[in-house]
Image (cartoon, rainbow, N blue to C red):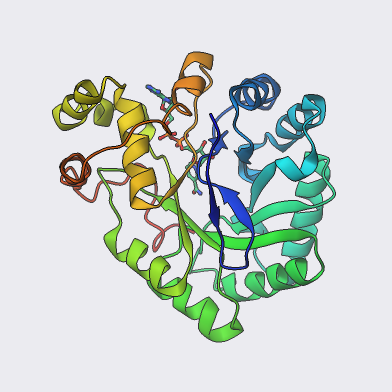
Amino acid sequence: MTVPNVTLNNGVEMPQLGYGVFQVPNDETEAAVTAALEAGYRSIDTAKLYGNEEGVGAALARSGIARDELFVTTKLWNDDQGYDSALRAFDASLSRLGLEYLDLYLIHWPTPERGRYVDTWRAFEKLLADGRVRAVGVSNFQPDHLRRVIDETGTVPAVNQVELHPYLTQEAVRAADAGHGIATEAWSPLAKGGDLLAEEAVTAVASRHGRTPAQVVLRWHLQLGNVVIPKSVTPSRIRENIEIFDFELSDEDVAALSELDRGLRTGPDPDAFN
Ligand SMILES: NC(=O)c1ccc[n+]([C@@H]2O[C@H](COP(=O)([O-])OP(=O)(O)OC[C@H]3O[C@@H](n4cnc5c(N)ncnc54)[C@H](OP(=O)(O)O)[C@@H]3O)[C@@H](O)[C@H]2O)c1
């Protein structure tokens, strides 16, 4: 399957579907990412926190796929917030990945209590200006955090990666992102694969389309315009999750999944997490 791109606000093209490796142990990551690359994924989402940047890099190197066909994202961890520490953290991540440049670098969490995300963002501006990264963005930023970095630096993030799935549709964040021209990327797009995939609203849409629950949830994201990065270490699911570009949900199907919204987070609240 060919994955369509979205065009970020600086003109860089990013695949609308990527492969996430949260909680994949480093020594299992090379095999998992290799399976994803074989299935056709070209965008990989990791983070310093995940401890598996080396495993990602090993799979990329072994794949023989041209660097410019790949889209690699990693994230700056909270302890590395600040201007100089962010520059050092970037160098260390790039070296663990074995890459000469990165496609997308994200501030993992705003951690408002630390009060450093604007300084960190200034380091990201430098990395971008120096050509070390093709696009810079943020993760878990609420609308007021977005406004602050934009007001104080004038540089608009290319991406805001947030928890987003039918239990947490994030209308306010999606509207703020769209208002600034920021692409919304959904983490835990399957709500971690638990109860959501057994919801009757989901299984009914799935059986109507002859698809799996995960496929219709991922399709819901695509039709809302979200970038998605489902994680699986199961080869059959890795393939299943990319086979979503040859069918379409009706407006009613999309609405039925959106109605599952109950503001349910599987992860921390960005305003409180430090
Ligand atoms: N920025 C952030 O703060 C942040 C936070 C969390 C996650 N993320 C990123 O988002 C990515 C995805 O989020 P996530 O890993 O938390 O959750 P997710 O992708 O919503 O769900 C992953 C879970 O769903 C299962 N699964 C995957 N495909 C399935 C399918 N087709 N049918 C049934 N079950 C399926 C997986 O099981 P198996 O693996 O056992 O197959 C795994 O347990 C992460 O890997 C990471 O890259 C970012």
Residue in the image at 53% along x and 21% along y = 233
In the rendered image, which quarter is residue 178 located in?
A: bottom left
- Give the total number of marks visible in the rendering: 0
The reply, left or right, for residue 118 in relation to residue 62 is: left
Locate residue 117 relative to residue 187 in the image: left or right. right
Q: Residue, x 45% and y 74% (percent of image)? A: 180
Return the x and y of residue 146 as percentages of the image width and height: 47, 72
x then y, percent, for residue 68: 76, 45
From the viewer's side, name the closer residue of 50 and 233. Answer: 233
Judged from the image, the quadrant occupied by ligand 1 is top left
At x 15%, y 43%, the residue is 252
* x and y percentages locating residue 147 in the rendered image: 45, 78
Which residue is pictured at 75% across the width and 56% down the height?
90
Residue 104 vertical placement versus 214 (above, below)? below
Percent position of residue 131, x then y: 80, 64
Measured along the vertical axis of the image, is residue 234 above or below residue 89? above
Q: Quadrant of residue 191?
A: top left
Picture layout, residue 123 above or below residue 203: below
- Is 136 located above or below residue 243 in the figure? below
Q: Which residue sits furthest front? A: 246
- 176 or 192, nearer to the observer: 176
